[in-house]
Image (spheres, rainbow, N blue to C red):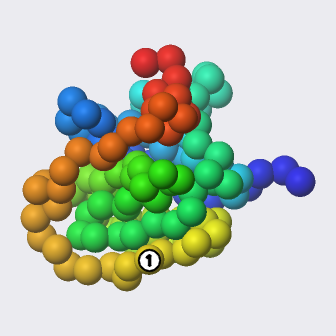
C-alpha cells in the first residue's frame, strides 16, 4: 500500500546542541525531514526518516510534540511560534498514524523553552540524523 502524505511544514527539531528548524513531511507510514521546503520539493533524499512503527505514542504540551520511542527515548518537535495555529493539525495527523495515540491532551503551557533536550538512543539518532 502506498504511503499518503498527511501534513508538512517547518518544525523545530530538538537536538543535544539546541533546536534546529527543519521541514517535516508526515506520511501515513513514516516521518521525514529536510533542511528546507525547497529540498523536499526537489525530492532530494530526506536528511532523516523515522518509521512510525517505531513510535509507541506521543504527547503534546504547549508547542511541543514529543514522540515516544522504545527505551524511554523521546524525539521532540516544536511547532514554531509563527505557525502556532498548526498545532491542532499536527496533533491530529500524528494521532491518526501513531499506534499508541496521544498520552496527554493539548495543554496551554506557555513556557515550552524550559523543556530538557531530547535523549537520543543510537537507533533513534540514526533514524533522524542521516546525512547531517
Where is residue 117 drawn, in percent x and y? 23, 45
Q: Would you name the residue on which mark 1 appears? A: 103
Quadrant of res 46:
top right
Give the residue at x 20% y 79%. Answer: 108
Q: Which residue appears farthest toward the top when viewing the image? A: 131
* Residue 15 drawn above or below residue 74: above
Q: Is residue 113 left or right of residue 37?
A: left
* Front one among 15 and 45: 15
- The quarter of the rendered structure image containing the N terminus is bottom right
- The quarter of the rendered structure image containing the C terminus is top left
Give the residue at x 67% y 54%. Answer: 53
Where is residue 122 drawn, in percent x and y? 48, 31
Q: Which residue appears farthest toward the right when viewing the image? A: 1
* Residue 102 drawn above or below residue 94: below
Q: Is residue 18 left or right of residue 105?
A: left
Q: Is residue 128 visible?
A: no
Give the residue at x 77% y 51%. Answer: 3
* Front one among 74 and 8: 74
**Disc 1 on helix, strand or loop?**
strand
Total of numbered circles in the picture?
1
* Residue 57 drawn above or below residue 5: below
* Front one among 116 and 20: 116
Amino acid at each position: 500500500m502506498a504511503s499518503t502524505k498527511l501534513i508538512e511544514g517547518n518544525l523545530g527539531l530538538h537536538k543535544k546542541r539546541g533546536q534546529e528548524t527543519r521541514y517535516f513531511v508526515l506520511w501515513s507510514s513514516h516521518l521525514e525531514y529536510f533542511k528546507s521546503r525547497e529540498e523536499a520539493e526537489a525530492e532530494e533524499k530526506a536528511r532523516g526518516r523515522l518509521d512510525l512503527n517505531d513510535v509507541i505514542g506521543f504527547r503534546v504540551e504547549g508547542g511541543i510534540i514529543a514522540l515516544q520511542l522504545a527505551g524511554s527515548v523521546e524525539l521532540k518537535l516544536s511547532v514554531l511560534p509563527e505557525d502556532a495555529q498548526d498545532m491542532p493539525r499536527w496533533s491530529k495527523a500524528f494521532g491518526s498514524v501513531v499506534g499508541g495515540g496521544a498520552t496527554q491532551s493539548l495543554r496551554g503551557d506557555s513556557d515550552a523553552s524550559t523543556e530538557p533536550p531530547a535523549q537520543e538512543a543510537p537507533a533513534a539518532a540514526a533514524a533522524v540524523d542521516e546525512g547531517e
